[in-house]
Amino acid sequence: MRYQSQVLRLQTDSDYSKRLPIELCGDLLRRLRPLMTDSLRMAVEGSSVAAGRTPGWLALASDIRFVDYARDGDETLIYLDLPALGAAAPELYDQAELWPTRPAAEYTAVDVFSEVVGEVDRDNQDSPWYDRHLLHKLSSVHRLFSDHLRSVALPCGSNGAARVHLLTGDTTAIADRLADSTPPPQEVRVAGQLDMIRRSTRSFGLQLDDG
């Protein structure tokens, strides 16, 4: 599978620049990977958690490899290799959609998670990019941030050429508040004509009376 490179930029103080304590570096990477995986599942399946085995496409898209690290002033750069969604899940992107619901095929797990962080920072209570489970998991990373580590810059689209979203302690606080205000799932009845069943994402489509 073809992998592409992306860079996470950590805003650190001079004592931590390219000299991260092993417990901080390990905790950061350990927490970011499941956040990216759950963000992928949310973006494609509409829920960040599901019962049963992990779909093959999700396992491939979450195959994130640490490659290198470097220094830029006081900032620490972490280099990752990971596949784009279109390469990891061709069966999802071979079928065209009348109304686009999936992330762009060139997006990676980093890009998708960056979108989640951007939506949380905007305090978008109606965002389709996250649910309560993902918000709770995002809020739990608050302990990573201190005077030593102030933010993690996440590229979004073309390796950040278009946008960069900052994951900070403020992001985790907003996520915690949004999680508390998000209503729990509930059963609803929606009537319509069955229009599509998609095995790969365990989803279906209904055409409602209003089109």
Image (cartoon, rainbow, N blue to C red):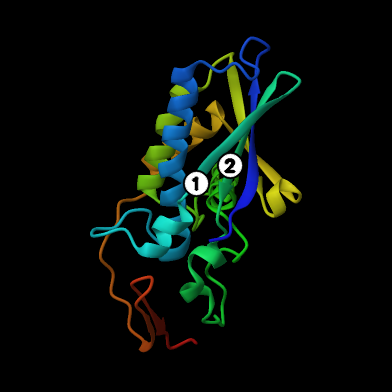
Q: Residues within 10 Å of mark 2 (few under 14, many from 20)?
A: some
Q: Decide which of tag 2 and tag 1 comes sooner along the chain.
A: 1
Between 16 and 172, the residue placed more toward the observer is: 16
Q: Residue furthest top?
A: 15
Above or below 85: residue 191: below
Is 152 located above or below residue 205 in the figure? Answer: above
Residue 79 coordinates in the image, percent (x, y): 62, 37
Q: Residue at x 51, y 43 (%)?
A: 65
Q: Amino acid at mark 2?
A: Leu
How far apart are the two marked residues, 2 and 1, measured between alpha carbons?
Answer: 7 Å
Q: Say which of 6 and 148 sits in front.
A: 6
Task: Name which residue lies at 45% across and 64% down.
Answer: 44
Find residue 103 and report its horizontal and vertical position in percent. Answer: 56, 63
Amino acid at pointer 1: Ile
Give SS at disc 2. strand
Residue 77 visible at all = no
For image coordinates 55% across by 82% down, the residue present is: 96
Task: Using residue 54 as the reference point, say whether residue 33 is left or right of it.
Answer: right
Where is residue 180, by image quadrant?
top left
Q: Is residue 145 among the parts visible in the rendering?
A: yes
Pointer 2 with pointer 1, Cβ within 8 A: yes
Name the residue nearer the viewer: 125 or 96.
96
Position of 147 relative to 41 (above/below): above
**Residue drawn 66% across and 44% down?**
155
| CA neighbours of label 1 inside 10 A, class few (<14), some (14 to 19), many (20+) | some
Write down the residue under mark 1: 64
Q: Is residue 88 above or below residue 76?
A: below
Q: Which residue is mark 2?
A: 80
